[in-house]
Image (cartoon, coloured by chain):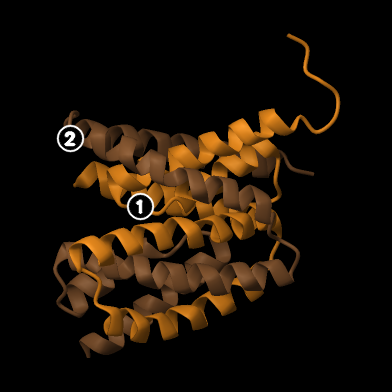
Chain colours: A orange, B brown
Amino acid sequence: MPSPPGPMPSHETLRLAAIGTLAGIFSGLFGVGGGTVIVPLLIFWFGYGERLATGTSLAAIVLIGLLGALAQGGIYGNVHVETGLLLAIPAVLGVVMGTAIQQRIPQRAVSYLFALLLVAIAIELILK
Amino acid sequence: MNEVLAILIAVAGGLAGGLVGVGGGVLFVPALAIFLGLTQVEAESTSLLMIVIVALVGAYRQNGYGNVRIRQALIIGVLSPLGVLIGVAVANNVSERALQLSFAAVALFFAAQLVRRARSAP
């Protein structure tokens, strides 16, 4: 069937839904965050630049993490709130530095860094 | 000393989040489990709390730089719990080793594609 002209919203929504579902599946299977799946797929399927893909991924992760943390904290009581909040302070410092640095390096460098992260994850999974 | 290492790893996790758009859990979980003595489940759960905070601040900063598509992010985020349910169901029916190796293969494939694409970019 020929594609309708324009931005094809329903097609786009379907692919976004697929990314969300896949991110959740990998998250449920491996405990790795959805970002590992979201960033590459936004780049491959939507042609996002690296900065747009990583920024949008972070926004999606807010929701994904929130739903997960509520389920874990509410149902199982496993979240150490105080420890998490304290350790979040240096982590937030890191993310503010990371986003600032990212704006000043070439986008393809972000792809190379991401590829390195994926290779590290693959090695860890193979050696497990 | 362990606290200092945990703080340094937390900074590195945040840096990774800002640079490549992941939550940083890959580093937060070992920081919490190895250096602060939480059990694996507690570390993973607490890591989620940290990821939310880090992703929130990171997304806010990226939005300031013009790098966030909010509507797209919402669709991805809202649908992921469906995927989690599928993932857990699959995990209970397929050997863990097969899953690990298949995800390793996916990760390597993604890595190769990213490098290939970046090399051919103008």
- Tell me which chain the residue with mark 2 is part of: B
Task: Measuring from the top left, give residue A59's x and y in whole percent.
Answer: 57, 60
Eye-nearest disc, 2 or 1: 2
- Tell me which chain the residue with mark 1 is part of: A
In the rendered structure, which amino acid carries the disc numbered 2?
A: Asn
Task: Measuring from the top left, give residue B6's x and y in whole percent.
Answer: 29, 81
Q: Is residue A2 left or right of residue A96?
A: right
Residue at image coords 53%, 57%: A113
- Helix, strand or loop at mark 1: loop
Q: Is residue B115 left or right of residue B47?
A: right
Q: Is residue A58 left or right of residue B108?
A: right
Q: Is residue B69 above or below residue B1?
A: above
| Quarter-of-image position of residue B90 | top left
Q: Is residue B28 above or below residue B75?
A: below
Residue at image coords 76%, 29%: A8
- Helix, strand or loop at mark 2: loop
- Disc 2 crowd, CA 10 A, few/some/many (<14, 14-19, 20+): few
- Residue bearing mark 1: A32
- Report the front residue among B66 and A3: A3
Residue at image coords 32%, 78%: A84
Task: Measuring from the top left, give residue B45's x and y in whole percent.
Answer: 27, 65
Q: Is residue A119 left or right of residue B38?
A: right
Task: Measuring from the top left, give residue A126's x and y in whole percent.
Answer: 25, 42
The reply to the same-chain question for discs 2 and 1 is: no
- Disc 1 crowd, CA 10 A, few/some/many (<14, 14-19, 20+): many
- Residue bearing mark 2: B92
- Report the front residue among B75 and B22: B75
